[in-house]
Amino acid sequence: MTTYYYILASQKFLLEEEPLEEVLKERRRDYADKNKEIDFWLIKQPAFLEAPEFAEIKAKCPQPSAAIVSLNSQFITWLKLRLEYALKGEFEAPSATISDPLASLEPVS
């Protein structure tokens, strides 16, 4: 199993109220410059929240939600320092309750 780290907040907060797009764009550019593989993802309506162990966390987060999920715990810690109104955590996947750690419940348009 792999450990995934996340920041979770409402979509409105992460995608409209915070300059997150600029942060992620800069990080992608930095990774490209260093020939480093992307290890973070923006997920709208993350499916991992449907796992029973996330019931309490899901209840704390305004819906619809969004998450930045990463394999890099330091990146998530850095984001949490910037994003006051976000929840931070981690989980292991694949597991019996989380088959795809990057799955979204948001309909594809």
Image: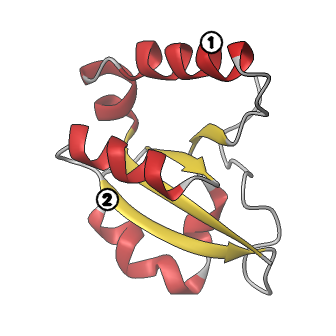
Q: At numbered mark 1, what does the secondary structure look like: helix, strand or loop? A: helix
Instruction: Point out which mark residue 101 bears.
Output: none
Quadrant that contains the C terminus: top right
Pointers 1 and 2 in contact (CB under 8 A)? Answer: no
Q: Specify which label sits upstream in the sequence, 1 or 2.
A: 1
Q: At numbered mark 2, what does the secondary structure look like: helix, strand or loop? A: strand
Question: Is residue 23 rendered to the left or right of residue 28?
Answer: left
Question: Is residue 65 rendered to the left or right of residue 34?
Answer: left
Q: Position of residue 19 (x, y in %)?
A: 32, 17
Which amino acid lies under the numbered mark 1 shown in the image of this protein? Arg
Q: Position of residue 54 (x, y in %)?
A: 49, 77
Which amino acid lies under the numbered mark 2 shown in the image of this protein? Leu
Q: Position of residue 75 (x, y in %)?
A: 46, 45
Q: Position of residue 83 (x, y in %)?
A: 24, 40
Tell me if residue 92 can be seen.
yes
Q: What residue do we see at 39% from left, 23% from top?
A: 20
Quadrant that contains the N terminus: bottom right
User: Quadrant location of residue 44?
Assistant: top right
Q: What residue do we see at 28% from left, 66% from top?
A: 60
**Image: 24 above or below 47:** above
Q: What residue do we see at 80% from left, 62% from top?
A: 100
Residue at the disc numbered 2: 87
Instruction: Point out which mark residue 29 bears.
Output: 1
Q: How is the image coloured?
A: secondary structure
Question: Is residue 29 rendered to the left or right of residue 37?
Answer: left
Find the distance from the CA under tag 1 to the CA under tag 2: 26 Å
